[in-house]
Amino acid sequence: MAKNASGFHTDVILVAAGLTFLKLLFSQLYYSTDFEVHRNWLAITHSLPLSKWYSENTSQWTLDYPPYFAYFEWSLSQLAALVDPGMLNVSNLNYASGATVMFQRVSVIVSDAALFAACLAIVSDVGGAASKSATRGGRGGVGAPALWTALLLLCNFGLLIVDHIHFQYNGMLTGLLIGSLLCIRRGQAKAGALLFAALLNFKHIYLYCAPALFVYLLRHYCIGRFSTGHLAVKLPAIGGSLSVARLASLGGIVLAVLATSLAPFAYHSQIPQLLSRLFPFKRGLCHAYWAPNFWTLYNCLDKLLEIVGCRLGLLTKQPGVGVMTGGLVEEFEHAVLPSIRPVHTFLLTALFLLPILYRTWSPVSGKPSRTLCIESAVLCAWTAYNFGWHVHEKAILLIIPLLILLMFESEFHARLALLVLPIGHFSLFPLLFTSYGMRVFS
Amino acid sequence: QQQQSKSSNSLKASCTRRYMAPNWQPLLPLLSALCLGLALRAAVAPYPHSGQSRPPMFGDYEAQRHWQEVTTALPVSEWYINSSRNDLLYWGLDYPPLSAYHSLALGYRAAAINASWVALGSSRGEQSPPHKLWMRGTVLTSDLFIHLPVLLASVAYSPVSPLLLLSAVAMLSPGQPLVDHGHFQYNCISLGLAAAAHLLVLRRRRLLGTCLFCLALNYKQMALYHSLPLFCHLLGDCCNLLLSAAAPWRAVRLLCSLAAVVLATFLLVWSPLLAAAPNGRAALAALQRLFPIGRGLFEDHVANVWCTINVVVKLKTIISQGAAAAVAAVATLAACAPALVRCLYRPGRSALLFASFAASLAFFLFSYQAHEKSILLPAMSAVLLLPEAPLFACSFQLLAAISMWPLLAYKDGLALPTVCCAGVFVIAVGLLFRWSPSIRPASRLVVALHACLHAPALAAVLAGAVLPAPASLPYLYSLLVSVSCCAAFCVFLLLAHLRLWRLIDLA
């Protein structure tokens, strides 16, 4: 195998091309209701004025992603008008002509270009993992960790089945996330902040990672030893100074991105409506398919205690209580253990985030290691996944790519990733509902 | 660094195969390749099958379902005979009895799931989604248990090292998934059995190999394409034994035991038919269905020499069918004679595999009533040749898929899966050569020559996709694809013969 960076680029390009063919082949497999969701959003953004985007509810699949995603759907809808205008009619519920299916599938494949760009960035990462030793169980003499990282990200099974079968746009978002983390790791904090702010405005689930990145950037980018010209404010407690210039520039970038995203809706006084769509707290503690997190165990324990209690005659079974296994998205009460409200999950998440944020702020070795920002992002996202309110099992797709990024840094990371990745991918199986989907599981 | 190089060296050493029992280390790459192959086949399955939604005759899918219906409803004696309950004009059974027994077993299973799927007469045209799911599942399971493990074994037992990549390329060969899992057929069973026979004969398990080959022959009579090289190889083995210093009675014993195995296998498979009706009437009717002389020299557009000649000289008007059959037989034997002689003269691993390839390709090009799907037989030999001549084998497999383009794209609506499977295959081969310097082609010139072989056919495919055919020649593009593929196949045949006689080296 070629050992120089341009050789790796060719490998990544070849594998991406092969995967494109595979993704095209998958285009006729099962798609979920998410297909109709995105078709509906194409219709809403194309046919309706901006002021109605977040208040439209002809279909049950209302727009609940932030504005950048809505703009993305709008630009797709301009192309969709050339393919099949029938899909852009808001009242055409469940419209799925052949052309519609192919258009949507191809749009996902094309948007994966963001992930492809991120993988190219990984194999051009000068001074990065390519110069480190240690690959685990190298097959056939291949020994370049950066290339393996890129290939594992490209061929990620979870992204493949969720994006190209179940139907979502996670590849593009993962590409943005990895891009921003790579920039931050390299010290290009402004670019990283820009990408991450944009990512948050595409899908706000990435807020899971935000606290970690905020703390990291504050402590390791804005605070340090600076020469004059940075408007530094001395902080003797920490032994460095806060660069107000840097803080302001980062803050300015984030606010500018927010402004471009929210300004049109503020103009139409749609912000409260937008926020209620983005953060729906009436959906219940768990999704219809439970995400394997702490609340799953909590629910099971509650159910067990209820059964035991009823058998022992200590309780009477109350109807409508403790019915989370019904497969519905709704609020409910627990039978034995205390019922959980959103504020409880928020407090628990914050509680478990504190150690992570503390260690991000002051790492063990004193200096931030190469992997610190990614590690803290992973742990932050994982904590939020574990204790959050109404977590989808698809949220594991935030964690898996970041673990793959870390996989080749050390043996500990490799072991962790090898343990978590199969389990994480296995937890995605309920998303492939039909028998066809279950077969394509390699 | 030192530890890393040591571990990779030991890995390379253990990856080097010799003819010995396998250890467990290759299991992971082989399993990964197997999963990749299964995923590809399962992904082709949702596409339309042959004859989907096309009454009254539908296609091969309906033929297989009809055979399940006929074999479960009628006694053995009536399977191959025209009657009011068994209309032979509507997809009459024309494969040997093992195929019929397979349909019988499938029919019982289908009836257990839903009796309306195989109800005599009333189930014609059944193609509901659960039925399609089940039928596709039967092909997938037979592929998984019979065909794919044999291909993996052929790669694993070869002395070439990049196990994961080679086995992945073997799994991704584009022709067979498209025909079996797209068009809908059960070639995987006869191809798998025939491939297993080749491998067993090479490992000196001759009796078992012969038995499996007879089973393959009794599943689809097209396996005859491979019969001559195997026969010559075994005969050559016997002659070697005869001429060797050891007691010549071993040769006689081998010959007799081989003959006994063949006879026993055939008797075992055909006995229900022979016993069913007096005077072997049922068996004779079956034979007539298996070898239909009345169907003509070729049908539609095949990448066959006769079809190509027919463009210029209208053969069907010049000679009668009997004479055409004779000419075809002579031409076929002449085309594969050098390979057979070589196999007889000094039987060995590469001799048998190249001869099998050459003979099956010669049969495809020159035999009577060749179907375009029969290109899968030389393609199977090409997969067995992967470790020996990777570029040659991969180039042929791609061309085989292209030669079926008129069938897959124009008649079956499988254009997208064909392009995707071919694309994935080409990329996999490219990665194989990039990442394994040991089996890289010797020079760019060789690669360019192979590209030239594919270029005319690809140009015809592209032209057919972009430009509409003129009204006076509606089948222009099918014909162009067939003719260019036929020319390329003749080149492959020549190359195989030259390699057999060690006149050239196919890296």
Image (cartoon, rainbow, N blue to C red):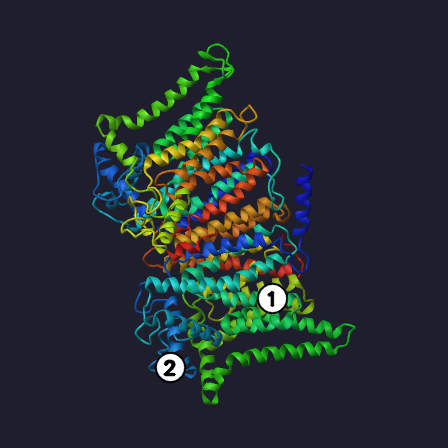
Q: Marks 1/2: CA distance?
A: 37 Å
Residue B345: percent from left, percent from top? 69, 68
Are dots 1 and 2 on a single chain? yes
Viewer-proximal residue among B53 and B288: B53
Q: Residue at x 45, y 39 (%)?
A: A399
The relative height of residue A221 versus residue B451 in the rendered view (above or below) is above
Residue B27 horizontal side relative to residue B35, left or right: right
Instruction: Determine the chain carrying the residue at label 1.
Output: B
**What is the quadrant of residue B281 in the picture?**
bottom left
Q: Which residue is mark 2?
A: B82
Question: Is the C-beta separation of discs 1 and 2 under 8 Å?
Answer: no
Q: Please tell me whether mark 1 sits on a helix, a strand or a loop.
A: helix
In this view, the residue farthest toward the top is A228
Viewer-proximal residue among A287 and B327: A287
**What is the quadrant of residue B503 in the picture?**
bottom right
Q: Residue at x 51, y 34 (%)?
A: A122
The relative height of residue B31 versus residue A378 in the rendered view (above or below) is below
Q: Amino acid at mark 1?
A: His
Sequence order check, earlier mark of 1 and 2: 2
Q: Label 1: how many residues lie within 10 Å, few (<14), some (14-19) or many (20+)?
A: many
Q: Which residue is mark 1?
A: B198
Q: Residue at x 54, y 46 (%)?
A: B430
Viewer-proximal residue among A50 and A294: A294
Residue B262: percent from left, percent from top? 59, 77
Instruction: Determine the chain carrying the residue at label 2.
Output: B
Residue B364: percent from left, percent from top? 51, 66
Residue A198: percent from left, percent from top? 37, 30
